[in-house]
Amino acid sequence: MAVPARTCGASRPDPARTALRWPSRGSRLGPGARRPAAGPPRPLALLLPPLLLLPLLAAPGASAYSFPQQHTMQHWARRLEQEIDGVMRIFGGVQQLREIYKDNRNLFEVQENEPQKLVEKVAGDIESLLDRKVQALKRLADAAETFQKAHRWQDNIKEEDIVYYDAKADAELDDPESEDVERGSKASTLRLDFVEDSNFKNKVNYSYTAVQIPTDIYKGSTVILNELNWTEALENVFMENRRQDPTLLWQVFGSATGVTRYYPATPWRAPKKIDLYDVRRRPWYIQGASSPKDMVIIVDVSGSVSGLTLKLMKTSVCEMLDTLSDDDYVNVASFNEKAQPVSCFTHLVQANVRNKKVFKEAVQGMVAKGTTGYKAGFEYAFDQLQNPNITRANCNKMIMMFTDGGEDRVQDVFEKYNWPNRTVRVFTFSVGQHNYDVTPLQWMACTNKGYYFEIPSIGAIRINTQEYLDVLGRPMVLAGKEAKQVQWTNVYEDALGLGMVVTGTLPVFNLTQDGPGEKKNQLILGVMGIDVALNDIKRLTPNYTLGANGYIFAIDLNGYVLLHPNLKPQTTNFREPVTLDFLDAELEDENKEEIRRSMIDGNKGHKQIRTLVKSLDERYIDEVTRNYTWVPIRSTNYSLGLVLPPYSTFYLQANLSDQILQVKYFEFLLPSSFESEGHVFIAPREYCKDLNASDNNTEFLKNFIELMEKVTPDSKQCNNFLLHNLILDTGITQQLVERVWRDQDLNTYSLLAVFATTDGGITRVFPNKAAEDWTENPEPFNASFYRRSLDNHGYVFKPPQQDALLRPLELENDTVGILVSTAVELSLGGRTLRPAVVGVKLDLEAWAEKFKVLASNRTHQDQPQKQCGPNSHCEMDCEVNNEDLLCVLIDDGGFLVLSNQNHQWDQVGRFFSEVDANLMLALYNNSFYTRKESYDYQAACAPLPPGNLGAAPRGIFVPTIADFLNLAWWTSAAAWSLFQQLLYGLIYHSWFQADPAEAEGNPEVRESSCVMKQTQYYFGSVNASYNAIIDCGNCSRLFHAQRLINTNLLFVVAEKPLCSQCEAGRLLQKETHCPADGPEQCELVQRPRYRRGPHICFDYNATEDTSDCGRGASFPPSLGVLVSLQLLLLLGLPPRPQPQVHAHPSRRL
């Protein structure tokens, strides 16, 4: 869905509001003409009283025809209103359907939706569902800590000693270039059989767990083999959990070593490109492994940073940003002699997807120059972290410095800002191959409770930009049971194909003692996670008793929606959470901001508001009344809300205890009855468990009938409420055919069809042949005309939808129709509800001719046209003078419905600005229409062509001929760095440029997430009838506009344009891609939305041992390596790498 527009890029004047000038030729201004409230000085003629201007319209020498008087056009409008109302009264059957409901009053009961009780019940059901997962999580975490504590570390463990199912084994065996195939893996990998399971949307094996190990970690390392050894015992706990709760989905242990063990076993979903999945970079793992973070990243861009090293730094920063979640805050700056932010963000901002994207793009623009100034970089970082006037995480505080080396320790800066309490951790990263002394970098990290890392080449980036989480986890581990609290994540896409899920997480701690002094271990072992599919939560919410426009929604502490009917991402990247704010899911206003804040604060509440809603087809805006009720979901960070229109306070519940009547009504669903009773479409709902779904409604109806021949509507395997209401509405709508439609001649009134649609899921279209051209959604709750009719009084016109880029309508065989619908409102015992919508489908061509007659001087179609004599003055009308006079009906969204111009009939349904831009602009400027701009953050766009920004395509340092001839170069660090670049480039060849989502995600996804700007128009505050003039010198035009009572139509009469010199700016309605990815992020961060972080924080523990803070490791190449390097470079035959696990120095378990 979308949010109120702020700005898309730089703000600029609205051309639509400034394009037109008020008329300067008063001689053409008709009586009742409207003038603007303010504007430029007007000519004297405009100041004359309207009565003095009347003669000017028919002055001697003028044409025999003059522009119609205002009272004439008002008369035409009344004729149009009467004709529409008459047809709807005869054929719509609103009154008759009311009587039918009352006559069948004994067949249904009126039930009440009590908002407070409803929302509390659903919240309680969700709490119970999640609590069962919490208990399973706790059993798993406790068992893991027990198993690891009892495990004995084996230094000499071998691959053949370990038996497990490698989830990636099948894919690797299919790939002849696979690392393990070439190397000849010695591990005993199980080969399993799988069965299809609809709950997992996958093939699974319930007898085993599966193991996934990141591509850049060597499976045969001692650390990994020991990890596989002790985690094998989790298998039985996983299975016992499932026995106790068969609804459990994926149960996962993500290890701090990178190993993922999950249950049940299923093959890994390998992408076409390199598999970059690492559990430690998943949103749920990051959230469970540490408390929220305030992070400042500073990057050395002094002249000593070589091209390759700078590219490594850029990639490292981007990878570091991916370790942050929406609970974290971050800023990125570059420094040499002075420090400056790399982007437009001047302070810490939330590490959400859009802000991180701004950082990543800005980082690519960094240029190396000047001299290294650590002091400038660190002072900038400390100032950022100490700024009290901004929203922040207020928990872990850290500085991450990327540099190629230096000698300054900037002790004075640390003394000033950070000592003696050392509340800010400092992590230093030595990037690239060089001969600098790294002692100062080690010292900075060790004296500030941080860690020192080295990133000599591409292969070290991912590992070393996430290892800092181990350090942040220390206070959590030392806090013990206090820190063992389950957290629930944002919505995100499951990597194994389950769809959108939330995950409950629980950290797992190392309970072993280090050394003879039995010092407590402070390492986090990993994170336990259990998935809950959003669909399982949705099943706990009422589906059809809330009506078409009622719904349940839920949000988290960030204001992101967990449940919402508008949560429909077009494409998802499973690396990132799906973060749709409540105020982006709906059209934002002050009332909703207040509701959102109250929900985040965990309060209960109820509020009735007037608000704007967007139609399902996103073409219209309606102003409606809604009742919001909300309560917190206990034991979680979520809050649940219920939205109900006033007319959905009550609903019908069928009570068809008479089986004979059930059979009678059911027969009207049979296709054999369609010819006499009209065609029936049934909503594709889950009426029974064994009902086969189908997108084809004819096939679905066939499946439904076949099932009903085997079971009764009262069967336990069926939803009795849905079935009884469906069958009742079948009988109710058939009686409408019998009482109203069957004896009427639709052709007399130029109707293609009549129809009735109900809450119960029935759409009956009469006659049967009209169903061939019926294109509306068979699910009434998903049909735009149905939902809009409930929200609007009177008759709602819906022209056929057209896209400006598509060819016009093809008017053949009178098949193009205009839908006119209205809600049926019942009042039963003082309780009001709207259980149905009825309407007609107008024949476009026939009604266009009728429209011309109704807006003319003829009283009926058979009367001859009146001719104007040569010496008389006559008023133009829409029929005789259609070459000079434009007459149109436009709906409340600005779309053309009818026109007196035959050449415009094939443009019916288009936005009127595409038909007559000049006139539509005038209507907008005269406040007949109001514009609403918003942003759709869930859109999908075709991928953009590759650009030349940033690191350049697969760019590496290229040695010159002189370098090759120089022996000193061969023994230099540059040669060694290039060697690693070539080796890792075989696997990570696109890291400097490729989109990680493309590398990791679904290979079938060719579109990427983007932001689309949407513009809708709706009726403004003007209800009066008046004339105005579009002033453009000799090209000026008079026009008249008037709303038609009890409809969503605007009747417009205007002079046809005399020339094209007056073309002003055209109003746009179609969705457009916003190049800046939505409202300008630099402006939005100045007005952050209200949020709350987790209520617990573990960033300090007095017993923390900070002595383990990283040590530099030189990597001098041996003579043999150098000789091999020379041969490989000359022959161009680099071997495949065998990357080793980069384990934390204390990772031995």
Image (tube, grey):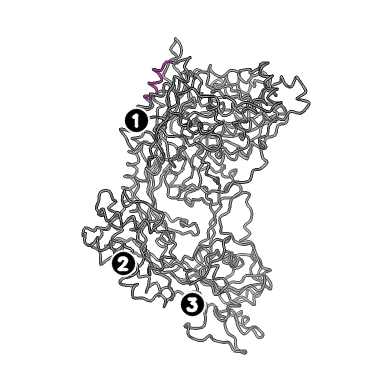
Q: Is residue 872 above or below residue 133?
A: below
Closer mark to the observer between disc 2 and disc 1 = 1
Question: Which amino acid is tagged 1?
Answer: Met
Residue located 49% across and 60% down the image: 620
| Along the line of sight, the residue nearer the viewer: 1015 or 243 | 243
Principal SS element in the magenta part? helix
Q: In this view, does 1079 lie to the left or right of 787?
A: right
Question: Which amino acid is tagged 2?
Answer: Gln
* Residue 394 in view in this figure: no
Q: Which of marks 2 and 1 is nearer the N terminus?
A: 1
| Along the line of sight, the residue nearer the viewer: 975 or 731 | 975
| Along the line of sight, the residue nearer the viewer: 179 or 58 | 179
Q: Would you identify the image quadrant in which residue 805 lies?
A: bottom right
Q: Report x, y in % for residue 1052.
A: 54, 72
- How crowded pointer 2 is (Cα within 10 Å; few <14, some 14-19, many 20+) is rated as many
Q: Are marks 2 and 1 in contact (CB under 8 Å)?
A: no
Question: Which amino acid is tagged 3?
Answer: Lys
Residue 805 on the magenta span = no
**Residue extent of the magenta highlight:** 142-152
Q: Report x, y in % for residue 60.
A: 65, 86
Element at badge 1? helix
Measured in 3D between alpha carbons, the distance from the residue under mark 1 to the one under mark 3, in whole angstroms, is: 72 Å
